[in-house]
Image: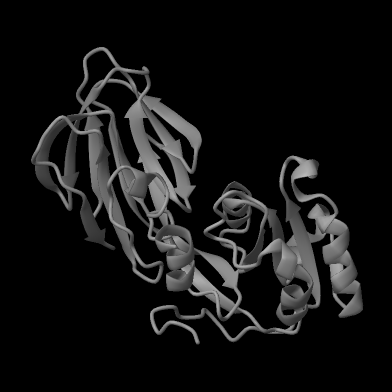
Amino acid sequence: MTSMLESTTHSPRAVKRATIIRHGKPETIGHAVEQVEAVARAHGVDVVGADEAANADLAVVLGGDGTMLRALARFLGTGMPVIGVNFGRVGFLASIRPEEMDGALARVFAGEYLVIELTTLDVDVDGTRGAAINDVVAHSSVLGRMVELSWEVGGEDLGHVHCDGLVAATPSGSTAYNLSSGGPVLARSLDAMAITFVAPHSLHVRPLVIPRGLDLVICNRTPDVDVAVIVDGHTLATTGRDRRVTIRLGAQRSLLATMPETTFFRRFRETFVG
């Protein structure tokens, strides 16, 4: 049974061409590439390389959440869904276990999968722009030094906070750094952003969830410490004093393919509840 909160972007179709995105360390996935290729051959699916990936119907990811994020970002805006076989530690975005791969991929190649639209974030740092699948983090660039951040939402000033940093997370990213910093988990069907301060030096700062249409603007007010702006784990820019960072819900959606039975709430229970 699928959750009513998870809507598909279109009716899934049988896969004719697939591409494979693998973990950066071959030893992590072993012979999984050959295994995918064998299942594909058995079901009449062509496996294409990176030079032809734009013409594929589906990307099969072999790795953990980091590899999944890389693939989702790579194919953002192309209309290609991405499905994951979890060879990572948590693998919250992946819906196939390695031991289930043959049977699951046979079903996927026959069109038995769902495609979920994932909300993204756009970030602008003085003209330097990026897109995030998981989160945008504004963090002190000096280990052990806190920063002072002013912040506003929808043009309304919300004051200054002394902290180690701030996490702006999509629903799919809400279970990562946002959650470990005390932020809320957002069901991935929500079109919203979670804002959570990291180690705030205040008893009055609370996480906030905002809808599409309201920009989050933060500004580094620290006189002698820069703020690093990190998009999905990669540094986009470093900001000095009084430089503004604008974060909003993105216009594009990334496309996550999942097994029909692997709903958000099932993965949440398996990962965080036990």
Residue 179 vertical position relative to residue 144 in the rendered view, above or below: below
Q: Is residue 107 toward the left or the right of residue 78 in the image? A: right
Instruction: Give percent across and percent down for residue 241.
Output: 25, 21
Residue 76 vertical position relative to residue 265 in the rendered view, above or below: above
Q: Which residue is at 81% across, 57% downward?
A: 32
Query: Which of the two residues, 154 or 119, is positioned nearer the viewer here?
Result: 119
Q: Is residue 206 toward the left or the right of residue 186 in the image? A: left
The image quadrant of residue 16 is bottom right
Q: Which residue is at 48% across, 84% downward?
A: 2
Instruction: Give percent across and percent down for residue 137.
Output: 37, 38
Residue 217 vertical position relative to residue 112 in the rendered view, above or below: above
Q: Is residue 94 toward the left or the right of residue 209 in the image? A: right
Q: How is the image coloured?
A: one colour
Query: Which of the two residues, 117 or 67, is positioned nearer the viewer here?
Result: 67
Residue 93 vertical position relative to residue 46 in the rendered view, above or below: above
Query: Which of the two residues, 257 or 269, is positioned nearer the viewer here?
Result: 269
Q: How many marks?
A: 0
The image quadrant of residue 52 is bottom right
Q: Residue furthest front?
A: 274
The image quadrant of residue 220 is top left
Instruction: Give percent across and percent down for residue 21.
Output: 73, 54
Q: Residue furthest top?
A: 224
Instruction: Give percent across and percent down for residue 60.
Output: 72, 63
Q: Which residue is at 58% across, 57% downward?
A: 72
Q: Is residue 68 toward the left or the right of residue 207 in the image? A: right
Quarter holding the C terminus? bottom left
